Each structure stands twice: as C-alpha cells, then as structure tokens.
Amino acid sequence: MDELDTALLRILQNDARRTNREMAAELGIAPSTCLERIRSLRERGVISGYHAAVDLKAIDRATQAIISIKLRPQAMAVATAFSDYVMQLPQTLDMFMVSGASDFLAHVAVKDTQQLRDLVLDLAKRQEIADIRSSVVFEHHHRTTVLPL
C-alpha cells in the first residue's frame, strides 16, 4: 500500500460510483494507471466488494436490535451450523461470534417490536440455544470508511 493506493481507497470508500476517469483526473494520473491500481487492490483482497447502502426505514425495517445468543453444546460444528442458519434469515444484517457471556451477537432489522418478538421466540425454539436476549437499538451510527489507511 502506497500513497496512491490509499488515495484511491479513500475516494472509493466515499463514493464507489466514481468513474475511473474522474478518479484519475482528481489524482493527476493516467486512467490506465488508475484502472490497474484498482484491479491490483481487488486481486490482493484489499477491496472486497462494492455495495449499495439501503435505508432500512425506506424498506419498512426501521426497528433494529442486537440479539445475544449462548449456545449448547459449545462445539464448532454447532456454532457453524447455527451461524449459517441465522445469516440466511432475511432479518439478519450482521452476525458476530464473540467471547464473553454470549457466543453470538446478531444485528437484525425488522418492521416493529412485534416482529422482533416473533423472531426472538422463533430462535428460542432451537435446541442449541441455551440463552437468548435482545436489546432494541435506539440509534445506529455506521462508519462507511476505514481511516486512517
């Protein structure tokens, strides 16, 4: 990673829809150099993808929560299968395997607290869950850029 790679990442993190020509002009480099540098960043795994940010309110999923889950037995096969299951649920935004009192934290978005209640009760029916608790998210601030690079 050099200064040019860092500058390209800063631009792409702020607006991944910028054209190659625009970025090259801003950085004072040839479009071919810009294109090759971005290709290299993708090939090295520095850039892992491009995504559209979705407003959860606009899709009627404004209620967010963190669901804390403790599993039993604590076996990797159980944890992997459970994580795969939760990640396929349409309500799941993020899933974290953590240390401490819980094994997983699931960040979910639903229409309202009734849907959150239904989701938690459905999850609680699973035999591998030893404990489940939910916390409604009142405010969520998400950083879209990783700085400093």
Image (cartoon, rainbow, N blue to C red):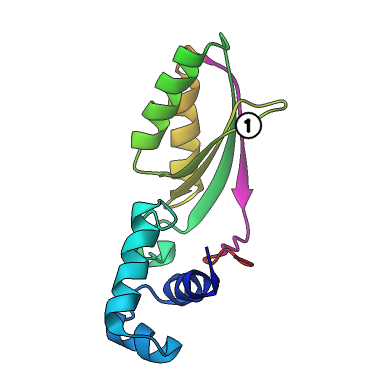
Q: Quadrant of residue 69?
A: top right
The residue tagged 1 is 98
User: Percent position (x, y) of residue 61?
Assistant: 41, 56
In the figure, is residue 27 to the left or right of 22?
right
Residue situated in front as seen by the camera: 67 or 35: 35
Count of numbered badges drawn on the protein? 1
Quarter of the image where the C terminus is located: bottom right
Question: Can residue 5 be seen from the camera position used here?
Answer: yes
Question: Looking at the magenta stretch, what is its main secondary structure?
Answer: strand
Residue situated in front as seen by the camera: 45 or 60: 45
Is 130 part of what is drawn in magenta?
yes
User: Percent position (x, y) of residue 125?
Assistant: 45, 18
- Region of the chain picked out in magenta, as a range: 129-143
Residue situated in front as seen by the camera: 135 or 33: 33
In the figure, is residue 15 to the left or right of 65?
left
Q: Quadrant of residue 77?
A: top left
Q: Residue at x 50, y 15 (%)?
A: 76
Q: Is 102 drawn above or below residue 62 in the view shown?
A: above
Q: Is 141 drawn above or below residue 133 in the view shown?
A: below
Is 87 part of what is drawn in magenta?
no
Q: Is 120 drawn above or below residue 11 in the view shown?
A: above
User: Percent position (x, y) of residue 53?
Assistant: 39, 65
User: Percent position (x, y) of residue 38?
Assistant: 35, 67
Q: Secondary structure at mark 1?
A: loop
Looking at this rendering, what residue extends furthest in the top direction?
Answer: 73
Check disc 1: other Cα within 10 Å, few if <14, some if 14-19, many if 20+: few
Q: Residue at x 51, y 74 (%)?
A: 10
The amino acid type found where label 1 is placed reads Val
Q: Residue at x 50, y 22 (%)?
A: 124
Question: Can residue 17 be seen from the camera position used here?
Answer: no
